[in-house]
Amino acid sequence: MTTINSELIIDTNILKENISYMKTQLNEKSNFMAVIKSDAYGHNIENVVTNIDDLVDGYGVVRISEAKKIRKISNKKILLMQGIYSDDELHKAIELNLDTVIHNKDQFSIIKNNNYFDGLWLKINTGMNRLGFEIDDFLNLYNKYLYDKKFILMSHLAASNDINSLSNKNQFKLFDNLSKKINKDIKKSIANTGCVMNFPSHTYDWVRCGIGIYGGYFQDKNIKTAMTLRSPVVNVRNIKKGERVGYDGRAIAKKNMKIATIYLGYADGLPVAIQDGTEVMINDQIAKVFGRVSMDLTTVDVTNLIDCTEGDWCNFFSPKLPVSNIAKNNDLISYYFMTSIKSRVKKVYKN
Ligand SMILES: *Cc1c(COP(=O)(O)O)cnc(C)c1O
C-alpha cells in the first residue's frame, strides 16, 4: 500500500557547505562551535553530528539529554549553554565530560561547593538582560575565586543581525573593557551567526553558530536553507470572482481563479497565522497562499501557473525558496519554522 505524506527533507551536504562558508569569516585562532540545541534546530541531532563532526570543534546544547546523544558519537567539546541547575546535573556533566556555562550566583554556588572549576564558561550580561552576571558582580567573584583559574568569558548579542544597531557597539565595548581587567590568557566568546557574518573582527577564540548552519540566515545568499518542507497537491478547482476560500472566508476571489489544496496544515507545524500572499513553490513556479491554513490542509492560488495538478509537490521552503522568505512575510523567524515541524511529517535524510 502506498500513501501520501508531507515530507521534511534534510540535505546534510548543505549543512556542510554552510559551515565551510562561515568558517572563512573566522580569524585563525577561532574555534567553531556548532549550536545544535533543540534537536539541531529540527534537523535531528544524531544526523547532524554524524555528518559535520570533522568540520567543527565542538557543540552547544541546552539539555543534558542532548549532550548524552552527542557523546555517544563524538569526543569533541560539548557546552551546556545554559549551565547546570543542581548538584546532580553537575555530576552528570562531569561524567559526560561537558563544559558548562555559569550564568548566575546559584550556578556559581554549585560549582564552588563542589570545588569544580574545569571547563567553565562565565557568562556576562552586556545588554541582553536575559542571563549572565552583571559586570561588577562578576569582577567580585573573579577577584575572590577565579583570578588563578582558566575559563572562557562569554556573552551573547541581542541584535547581531542588525549591523547598524547601537546595542552591538555597546555590548562589544563592555565585553572588551571587562576582558582588559582580567588575566589576558582568558579565552573569549561572544559571536553567534549574525556576529560572525556582520562583525568578523569579534570572533575571538570560540564562535557559537546555529542558524547559519541550517541556512536560516538571510543576509548572505551563499548560505542556503538545508530543509525542504513539501507536501502534495491533493485537489485543484476553479472558482469564480467573488467566491471565498477556506475558514471564515478570509480570502475573496477578485477574479476567476484556480485553487490548489495542499496536504499540509497547522497540525504539521505550518503556523495558522500564515498570511494570504505568502509564497510557496510548485513545479519551480511561485504560487501564493490563499485562505486560512487549516489543521490538515492549505489552499494556494495557482491561477498563473503553467502546470499544476494533483500529485505535484508544493514546497513551503527549500534550498531554492529560503525559509527566511516565509518567515519574514509572516513576521516570524526562521528558527521558529525549523523547530515547529511536527512528528507526523516524514523525515527524509539526504546525504
Ligand atoms: C542559540 C544560541 C546561539 C546560536 O545562535 P544563532 O543565532 O542560531 O547562531 C549562540 N549562543 C547561545 C548562548 C545560544 O543560546
Image (cartoon, rainbow, N blue to C red):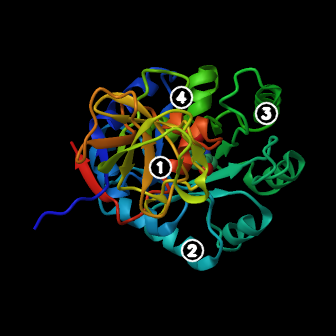
Q: Position of 194 compared to 68: left or right?
A: right
In-front residue for pair 279/73: 279
Find residue 128 and report its horizontal and vertical position in percent. 78, 44
Foreground disc of the pair 2, 4: 4
Ligand 1 is found in the corner quadrant, namely top right
Q: Position of 300 compared to 177: left or right?
A: left
Q: What residue sits right under mark 1 in the picture?
A: 338
Q: Residue furthest right?
A: 136
Q: What residue sits 25% from the left and 47% below the top? A: 310
Amino acid type, mark 1: Met
Q: What residue sits right under mark 4 in the picture?
A: 218
Q: Is residue 302 above or below residue 236?
A: above
Q: What residue sits right under mark 3 in the picture?
A: 171
Badge 3 or badge 2: first in the primary sequence: 2
Residue 204 seen: no
Q: What residue sits right under mark 2 in the picture?
A: 89
